[in-house]
Amino acid sequence: KLPHVSLCVSCPDFEAAAKLVLPHKSYVYASGSANTALSLRGNLDDWSRITFRPRVMRNVGHVDTKRSIFGHSSQYPFYISPMGTLGAIHPGAELEMVKGAVRKGTHMVVSTASTKSSEQIMTTCLSELEKMGGRSPTQLFYQYYMPVDRKKALNLMHVVKKAGYKGLWITVDTPVLGKRTADRILQAEEALAVGLSDDDSAETTAEWETGDENTFAPSMGGRPVSGQLSPHTTWEDLLWIRKEWPGPIVLKGIQCAEDAKLAMEHGCDGILLSNHGGRQLHSAPSSLMTLLEIRTYCPEVLGKIEVFLDGGLRDGNDVLKALCLGATAVGVGRPFLYALGAYGVKGVERCVDVLLDELVTGMRLLGITSLDQCRPEMVNASRLLND
Ligand code: FNR
């Protein structure tokens, strides 16, 4: 039986609840990762390997958690990460997610591979904002795969711009789809059940699976995915997009210091350190490792452009650690997806509350009253660096 939403007091509770109610296939889609899950585990574990260096007796009676993303302020230094095919998670799909975002005032990044159109999602956002009577600062940003066909690419940019999205989050860690182990097992099981051979199974991908974030075509063998993703994309393409898109551009999926620098030099307004929630490259660095690398090899990036990260954040204190080390804001993925799957819009709202409550308590116990006071010396990363 599904526990009452108020019994979800930490992020892992949402996953446990979702596991009870989601169809097996949907849970596999949400929880899945690449290969033997090394990247996924690294994302989760690395946050526990750095500790705080708290200060005491600092009058922490009043705490301010405000942060801005490209000038758009909200009460939260975290936003909802782009995740494709939310229709497999909840019948209201992205519309339900965006309602939760607006009701709590969090920003959200909408996936190219959404079940609902970018215009529908924006319309729902605007009507929900109206209901809130201007009390919600929520803004939507758009996650964009570097397109193969430039005409289509341009068209999509116009649609997204006209709809009112405030920035492009260009995902660059997916020239081909990673090896999604659990998906493959599921496909093989389905094929066996209907008496098909393993080879045939690649052709039987169900409709919603083909709408998966990147799985626009059967995903066997790291083949490029037709239509959306291109293994041929280079930094030249980014220069082209830079000319065509006037608003903020964030490169999503930066995984080393050299690329962080290149992104800055190619005119990006921000970078998002991410390994796609451990769903792409096997043994990819956690975003925390990448942030530490940037601090060592090109710290100037942190002052010049906005630096986001995502992956494995499951507690408001993980958010706080990232901000101490210089992140502008962070993305949270699966916890919101599980919350949506189990409780719909109420779950999304609850998940925001859980993270905020942990963040506020964490700030007080760390001895700060505003996120501007976050400093690298407030965390000890030596265990992670010296291993
Ligand atoms: C994703 N992610 C993703 N990223 C992206 O750029 N486009 C997409 O369509 C999707 N789709 C997607 C679906 C699902 C089910 C998951 C779990 C993830 C990656 C996502 O934006 C983000 O990088 C990670 O989810 C962050 O890690 P956590 O918070 O889930 O650990």
Image (cartoon, helix red, strand yellow):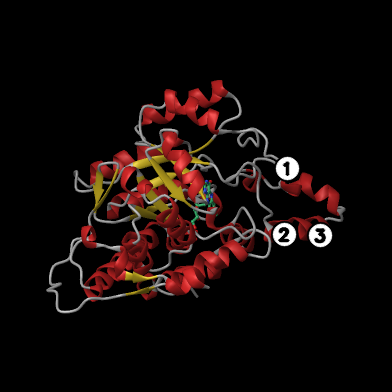
Binning the other alpha carbons within 10 Å of mark 3 as few (below 14), some (14 to 19) or many (20 upward) gives: few
Could one spot residue 163 in this view of the protein? yes
Cα distance between the residues tagged 2 and 1: 19 Å
Of circles 3 and 1, the one toward us is 1
Dots 2, 1 in contact, CB < 8 A: no
Looking at the image, which residue is at 60% across and 25% down? 149
Vertically, is 202 above or below 192?
Answer: above
Q: Position of residue 179 (x, y in %)?
A: 69, 54
Dot 2 lies on which element?
Answer: helix
- Residue 71 figure quarter: top left
Cα distance between the residues tagged 3 and 1: 25 Å
Name the side, left or right, on which 10 lies relative to 136: right
Looking at the image, which residue is at 63% across and 54% down? 281
Q: Mark 2 = which residue?
A: 186
Q: Position of residue 356 (x, y in %)?
A: 29, 65
User: Which residue lies most toward the bottom here?
Assistant: 57
* Kind of residue at badge 3: Ala
Q: Nearer the viewer, residue 274 or 216?
A: 274
Q: Mark 3 = which residue?
A: 193
Looking at the image, which residue is at 72% across and 59% down? 186
- Asked whether mark 2 and ligand 1 are closer than 8 Å, the reply comes as no
* Kind of residue at badge 1: Arg
Of circles 2 and 1, the one toward us is 1
Could one spot residue 17 in this view of the protein? no
* Kind of residue at badge 2: Leu
Q: Mark 1 = which residue?
A: 223
